[in-house]
Image (cartoon, rainbow, N blue to C red):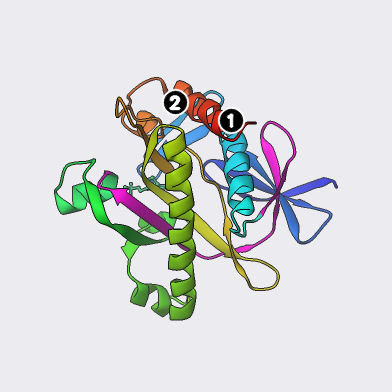
Amino acid sequence: MTKGAMLYEGKAKQVFETDNPNEVIVRFKDDATAFNAQKRGSVDLKGEMNNAITTLIFEYLNTKGIATHFIKKLDEREQLVKKVNIIPLEMVVRNYSAGSMAQRLGVEEGIKSPVTIFDLCYKRDDLGDPLINDHHAVFLGAATYDELDEMYELSSDINDILIDLFDQMNIILIDFKIELGKDSNGKIILADEISPDTCRLWDKDTMKKLDKDRFRRDLGEVTEAYVEIYERLKKVLHK
Ligand code: TMP
């Protein structure tokens, strides 16, 4: 397997072609952005940590029957994944109030929700990834109603598995964002990453934030938080 040309560069990752048309290499960068890239920076070790954390989580989800794009970790920063057509929707799953939802609704952060909350965002950097609803997604041709049903079910299953996994790490899964894609057979599978960049993770005892909010809000100890998540994950997964 050889690494070919770069196909795409995002804010936190690069994607390279390989000699297999159905597989690509994802490279995790240390670059960090927030607020639609108005805030930019770099977090030491972030690329390595997110590659390692995503690897462990996607492997774990695979063992629980969730289909993902993940094939194998190649080195510190790179992993081999199935090439998918990314559905241009971000699925946000929330178990507690936080972030943009807390702001939008004028409530404090950290209120446990009696129901699982799903937010759909349209992946369009130039628009700031706006919050949309199912009808907008169908209007845009991003997904059909049946596909949306499937996406909500998959997201809910992933949420159940991750709540339990993070609970074993003494962490509350406040919320997270996932991206889904269609593989070469048109099957909807989990893609992108699951890491402290894409989740809100609070220590159960101290409520300390162990995720990208430390970067977004200038809370300090950013690298330490990512390393802490990796260490706890390795421990519960016996890796
Ligand atoms: P939000 O409260 O800012 O909408 O974020 C909800 C969750 O989605 C949170 O866990 C952080 C994650 N997220 C991303 O992964 N990428 C993004 O661009 C944004 C805005 C949030």
Q: Is residue 25 magenta?
A: no
Residue at x 31% of width, y 30% of height:
217
Total marks shown come to 2
Tag on residue 40?
none
Q: Amino acid at mark 2?
A: Ala
Quick one: SS at disc 1? Answer: helix
Q: Is mark 1 within 8 Å of ligand 1?
A: no
Quick one: SS at disc 2? Answer: helix
Q: Are marks 1 and 2 in contact (CB under 8 Å)?
A: no
Numbered disc in front, either 1 or 2: 1
Q: Is residue 78 left or right of residue 221?
A: right
Residue 128 percent location from the top left of the image: 36, 54
Dot 1 or dot 2, earlier in sequence: 2
Q: Is residue 70 left or right of residue 145?
A: right
Examine the rendered structure and indicate whether residue 28 appears above or below residue 155.
Answer: above
Q: Is residue 79 magenta?
A: yes
Residue at x 32% of width, y 50% of height:
95
Q: Residues within 10 Å of mark 1 (few under 14, many from 20)?
A: some
Where does the magenta region start and end?
70-98
Residue 189 percent location from the top left of the image: 59, 62
Q: What residue does disc 1 label? A: 234
Q: CA distance from mark 1 to mark 2?
A: 14 Å
Q: Amino acid at mark 1?
A: Lys
Q: Is residue 179 left or right of residue 114?
A: right
Q: Residue 188 occupies which quadrant of the picture? A: bottom right
Q: What residue does disc 2 label? A: 225
Examine the rendered structure and indicate whether residue 168 appears above or below residue 114.
Answer: above
